[in-house]
Image: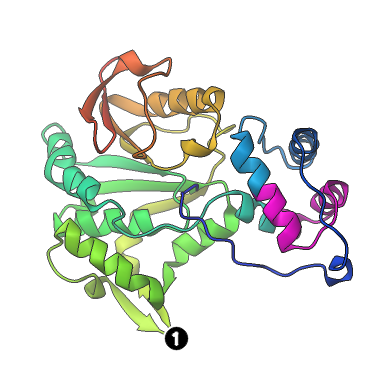
Amino acid sequence: MFDSQKMFTGAGGFSEHSSEKIQEVEIADLRKITQAIKNCYGYDFTDYAISSFKRRIQRILELYKIPTVDQLIKKIESSVTFFEEFLAEITVNVTEMFRDPSFWREVRDHIIPNILLNHDTFSIWHAGCSSGEEVYSMAILLKEMDILDKVNIIASDIDKPILTKAERGEYNMKNMELNEKNYIRFQGKSSLRDYYTEKNGKAVMDKSLIERVSFRNYDLVQGNVFNKFDLVLCRNVMIYFNQNLQNTVLKKLYESLFRYGYLAIGSKESLIWCEIANKFIVVNNEEKIYKKIKE
């Protein structure tokens, strides 16, 4: 879902407004936008970090050459298609395979072996899976451990189009060089090329990797707890939420874990301050991996 490496792609525009000056977004404008979205579509952006949300709204006005916030709201309210594009720009959807290779080594060498001490099969939730690079990284890791057929995975995101991209598993070849470098630093068993075929400038991931993956459109902010997992990954998602919303989401992630299950968050995120902090122990502070010890 959210990731600090988001890049705006420059989708379309309203050329008839191109000569008009773009409005500067104010805090009151953000309230109007969030209320309109909540009324029309049920999504709640109220507790998103203001500075980040404001930057993205301003960027959307410029990207689509919409002069005023009122015109933006009108477009959001009148076009589901535009709202999906808006949502894709607000959320953060560019990531890498095996990003932070040391994290993936920790998962492979310590976390999963510990889970397997008590379970023959287990479950993983990628909460905010974005375009799917993290999901395929996990599938490759599990395949190389020869346990891919023992794991059920749910990958969820609020953004339907990006979720479709994740399920399709097709990535620009120009991105694969960085992914390959990450895989090498992860110390994988072979080459990343063994897991995809090149077609029309795209790396098409091996579909067998996601045979046990269920992709789900899910709102991490407002959605209900829907299952229990042995490992939950929600990395680089909450840095875009204010503290109140982070606390709400962390409680939801806590409730989604079995006792002694593991939670992995982003390197710039923390559990220390939140209400459920005493229900976890720190497994690896550098990689931000925690273990649930209390119900």
Is residue 211 visible from the viewing direction of this image? no
Looking at the image, residue 260 lies above or below residue 147: above
Residue at 31% from the left image edge and 67% from the top image edge: 178
The crowding category of the residue bearing disc 1, from other C-alpha atoms within 10 Å (few below 14, some 14 to 19, many at least 20), is few
Q: Quadrant of residue 169?
A: bottom left
Q: List x then y, in percent, for residue 193.
A: 25, 75
Residue placed furthest toward the bottom: 200
21 relative position to 112: left or right: right
132 relative position to 52: left or right: left
Query: 28 or 142: which is nearer to us?
Result: 28
Query: 135 or 268: which is nearer to us?
Result: 268
The residue segment tinted magenta is 56-83
Q: Quadrant of residue 139?
A: bottom left
Magenta segment: does it hold 165? no
Callout 1 secondary element: loop
Residue at 54% from the left image edge and 30% from the top image edge: 224
Query: 124 or 20: which is nearer to us?
Result: 20
